[in-house]
Amino acid sequence: MRVGQVAKQSTYPLWGGIDGFDPKRGSAEVASYYLAVGAIVGVVLGVVIGVLIAIAGVPTGASTIAGAAVLVGSLVVAAVGYSQAGVDESHLLDLALLDDDNAPRAESLVEGISASIGLEPPNVFLLDEPQINALAIQGPGRTGAVVVTSGALELLTRLELEALLARELVKIRSGEVGFEAKVRAFRRVVGRFWPGAVPTVYTHAMLGRDIAADVGALTATRFPPALISLVLKAEEIKVQPTADPKRRLFGPFWFIPELRDVVTAERLTEISEF
């Protein structure tokens, strides 16, 4: 599998001319999710209300207009929901804010990488867990933020930590984190009625997205051996799917996804070719 076949064009060019995330296409894709659900809900409610009005003896024209109004209203609500989705997600995880005082190495790396890719240094949060992992989320003020585990800070070398942070910072730089935040907001609502809306198994599409993100890290660091070493070291501490419904929303988006059947061999193959 070639990365260009599974990823999308990015406003931040990736190493080797490989396609990355396309913010416009991503926005259109996630907006279609919201509008599709709004249309389904509107049609169902419109039909029910139209039938009830007809049973009450109201003229057919009036019931049709009422049903159409309900559909339009539902689409408007869906559109507003899309525009407001993806706000601060930091409250959904048990996080502590990092700074120069409690994590000078991480802060220094974030500042350096951010400067190299043209990004305002975002907030960095700590998740107290022994696994090696990181995640880009939407932080306060609809700005991207990075979550890194205590295991990553304790067990990774400077170059490995740089590769891990670079991967998430490039996702913020490309706008992908905003797209993902809206997807998570959508799943948070829909998942209450349809648990299958929240993935639990690693898929081929997720693999393609992860490879593109890995290439993003290489674009920023230009040092594949560190990323390869990082993946191998992270594999030693197996990441397990979580039962926490809030945490499950983030499952597919971690550096090492918190899902079943996660395989990193193909990611390592792609990285090794650079």
Image: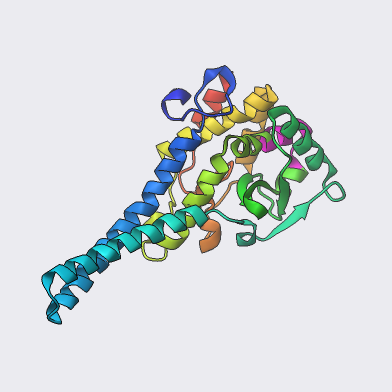
Question: Is residue 147 within the magenta segment?
Answer: no
Q: Residue at x 59, y 41 (%)?
A: 255
Viewer-proximal residue among 274 and 131: 274
Image location (x, y in percent) of residue 113: 73, 32
Q: Quadrant of residue 261?
A: top left
Classified by dominant secondary structure, the portion drawn in magenta counts as helix
Query: Taking 265 as reference, is 36 left or right?
Result: left
In the picture, which quadrant includes the C terminus? Answer: top right
Is 141 located above or below residue 71 in the figure?
above
Viewer-proximal residue among 247 and 4: 4
Query: Taking 54 as reference, is 135 left or right?
Result: right
Image location (x, y in percent) of residue 12: 59, 28
Viewer-proximal residue among 25 and 213: 25
In the picture, which quadrant includes the N terminus? Answer: top left
Number of numbered markers: 0
Is 133 located above or below residue 117 in the figure?
below
Question: Is residue 162 within the magenta segment?
Answer: yes
Residue 106 appears in the picture as rendered: yes
Query: Taking 172 as reference, is 103 left or right?
Result: right
Residue 258 appears in the picture as rendered: no
Image location (x, y in percent) of residue 178: 55, 45
Viewer-proximal residue among 204 and 78: 78
**Residue range corresponding to the magenta coloring:** 155-165
Residue lying furthest right in this view?
101
Q: Quadrant of residue 154?
A: top right
Q: Residue at x 73, y 28 (%)?
A: 116
Is 260 located above or below residue 116 in the figure?
below
Residue lying furthest bottom in this view?
56
Q: Quadrant of residue 115?
A: top right
Q: Residue at x 54, y 40 (%)?
A: 176
